[in-house]
Image: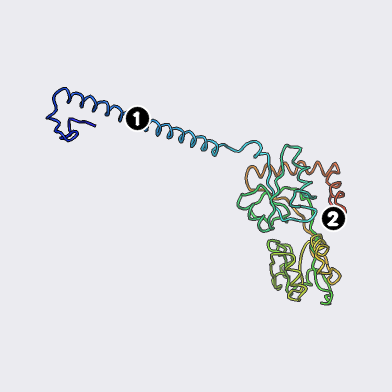
Amino acid sequence: MDFSRRLYINGKKYSDYDIKDRDKFDLQSRRNAKEEGKKAAGIGGVNCKKSLVAVIMLSVCLSIWMVPKTDAAEKTISFATEEWKDATERDGTGLYWDILRAVYESEGYGIQPIIRSYIGSVNLLKNHSVDAMIGAYVDEIENGVYPKNHFAVDIVQALYKKTSNVKWSGSQSIRGKKVAWIEGYSFEQYLPASVIVSTLIRRVDTRELGIHLLNTSKLDFFLDAEGDLKDFFRDTPEYRMNDFAMKTILELKLYVVFINSKRGENLARLFDRNFSRLLKSGTIKKLYEKYSAANFTIPSSF
């Protein structure tokens, strides 16, 4: 504080003090000003240090965020799929996972299972959120990269109640009837157009809903893969398989479909090369035999 600018000091005019006292007041004023300057500098220094630390931390965070994919990430292949018993179990076990590991692990790749509904898996692939999806039919996925090799087949059955007295004559038997299958399964692409145009088709979210509608006579037929139907009746005792009849209506090849990108194309080529080698060596057939107790049909071409 500058005492010379104050009119009074301790109740007395500054000008009434003698020169010696005024010099003392001025000296104290300069000391006070110096101390205040030091304090200000100290606070500024602390703030400066804090700002520097903040800048360094922000730089570290940005550098971590901007790090490109590691080799580990590049060597992990994400597969989206519906959960199918003994084929694509949620814990990574099953025939289809075993086949994919046999194809890719020898090349240093890891397998990342992602379980969704069938239509959810298709959408993840279309949105480029996964590297591949499992179990599509030929030409079913637009803009997907298909390998040349299929890895399994679906024996599609038309399920109906025995009490309906159906006289089965192939796909023509469902013509003009109320028919359902699971949302995302594109059976209409593989059935005769003359059958589809006159058939009342409904898509359902779950297998259980489809069979419930069939059992309560709200449907005439429910179309689904043979293995999935057998698994359903085995695991759902409230429905008796003996109350229903099954007739084969389609045989469709199953494919792994890859993302439409350079990475997807490379993974598809790698799949074809290694799958063909494993097929020739008998490894694929042995994997099917490992699951002989499950409801799988070994493709005739294997």
Q: Nearer the viewer, residue 211 or 155?
A: 211
The structure residue drawn at horizontal position 62% and vertical position 53%, both measured from the top left corner, is 126
Give the answer, above or below, for where 115 lies relative to 237. above
What amino acid does circle 2 point to?
Ala
Looking at this view, name the residue that lies furthest to the left.
16
The reply, left or right, for residue 102 in relation to residue 125 is right
Q: Earlier in the sequence, mark 2 or mark 1?
A: 1
Q: Please provide percent x and percent y for residue 59.
A: 49, 35
Q: Which mark is residue 239?
A: none
The residue that label 2 is drawn on is: 294
What amino acid does circle 1 point to?
Ala
Q: Please provide percent x and percent y for residue 55.
A: 45, 35
- Dot 2 falls on a residue whose secondary structure is loop
Question: Where is the N terminus found, in terms of image quarters?
Answer: top left
Q: Please provide percent x and percent y for residue 47.
A: 40, 34
- Dot 1 falls on a residue whose secondary structure is helix
Q: Quadrant of residue 225?
A: bottom right
Looking at this view, name the residue that lies furthest to the front.
11
Of tags 2 and 1, the one toward the viewer is: 1
Q: Alpha carbon of mark 2 to alpha carbon of mark 1: how far?
A: 79 Å
The reply, left or right, for residue 112 in relation to residue 62 is right
Give the answer, above or below, for where 167 lies relative to 66. below
Q: Please provide percent x and percent y for residue 82.
A: 72, 56
The structure residue drawn at horizontal position 43% and vertical position 31%, both measured from the top left corner, is 49
Q: Which mark is residue 41?
A: 1
